[in-house]
Amino acid sequence: MRLGGPIFEKYGNPEKWISIINSLGYTAAYCPVTPETTEETIYEFKVAAKKADIVIAEVGAWSNPISQDEEERKRAIEKCWKALYLADKIGASCCVNISGSRGKKWDGPDEKNFTKETFEMIVYTVRKIIDEIKPQHTFYTLETMPWMYPDSADSYLELIEAIDRKQFAVHFDPVNLICSPKRYFSNRELIKDFIKRLGPLIKSCHAKDVILRENLTVHLDETRPGLGNLSYETFLSEINKVDRDIPLMIEHLTDEREYKLAADYIRSAAKKIGISL
């Protein structure tokens, strides 16, 4: 697989961008441009990435396309269209979003998130996004989440069948699937099962960790890779069996030092099982 993460240093051209990525030892990267970038510049970054053997992992479309607020929903769908178009133009592995929430917080829990009505809204919305852009070189994906669909291998498979679009694929974040002590302590089996059933459709992954606190009731906190209970040896070995070019993107840390520590830990875990990152 290919390791990547955010970059903090400024860049004004593809050459500088590639130089920064190489200095960090990454072979994958988040999309370096925005949907407002000119097509000429998008093409320049695409060519530079290919020449340097850097995989552009994903274009984020972070928004709530099933919001109960009509204007927010329209803006979100338009954002998804633009992000998916950019992902296709620049040759990213995928465009990624969450399915969305029926509550006030765009990525938060709500009692309606697991209803049949919401499931059908997700199906309709994903089809609408894909059918408008008709991507040829990338995929639209939904990040796995603890309190909205897809929250398991089962619900992801149900969505794939219902959406029925070949350019709909899978984004895997195992930490987001860990929403109970049972899943926390059996995360090796959870990872293996998910990848066994969905592996060929996984286009990008997120790298972080999770820790279960001892105070009641249940407190699960996201933390830096290596500081929690996620079995990285299982995660890395199972993903590597599927495709050695799948991006593994570190996220949600505060500064360059934290990202370096995370990358060092992931590389050390990979080395233990004979994988080079």
Image (cartoon, rainbow, N blue to C red):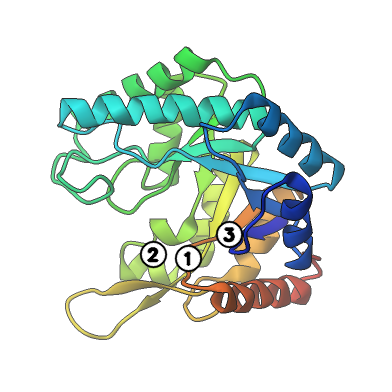
Secondary structure at badge 3 equals loop
Q: Which amino acid, by three-letter code, is at mark 3?
A: Pro
Relative depth, front residue between 47 and 2:
47
Task: Tell me the residue that label 1 is attached to.
Answer: 187
Task: Tell me the residue that label 3 is attached to.
Answer: 6
Relative depth, front residue between 203 and 240:
203
Task: Tell me the residue that label 2 is attached to.
Answer: 183
Answer few, some or many: residues within 10 Å of disc 1's Cα (few below 14, many 20 plus, some between 14 and 19). many
Q: Quadrant of the C terminus?
A: bottom right
Describe residue 232's horizontal placement relative to residue 275 as left or right.
left
Describe residue 111's horizontal placement relative to residue 136 as left or right.
left
Q: Looking at the image, which residue is at 15% across and 45% down?
A: 104
Secondary structure at badge 1 equals helix
Note whether 234 is above or below 88 in the view shown.
Answer: below
Examine the image and state in which quarter residue 240 appears: bottom right
Q: Which amino acid, by three-letter code, is at mark 1?
A: Asn
Residue 67: image location, x then y, percent = 21, 33
Mark before the other along the chain sequence, 2 or 3: 3
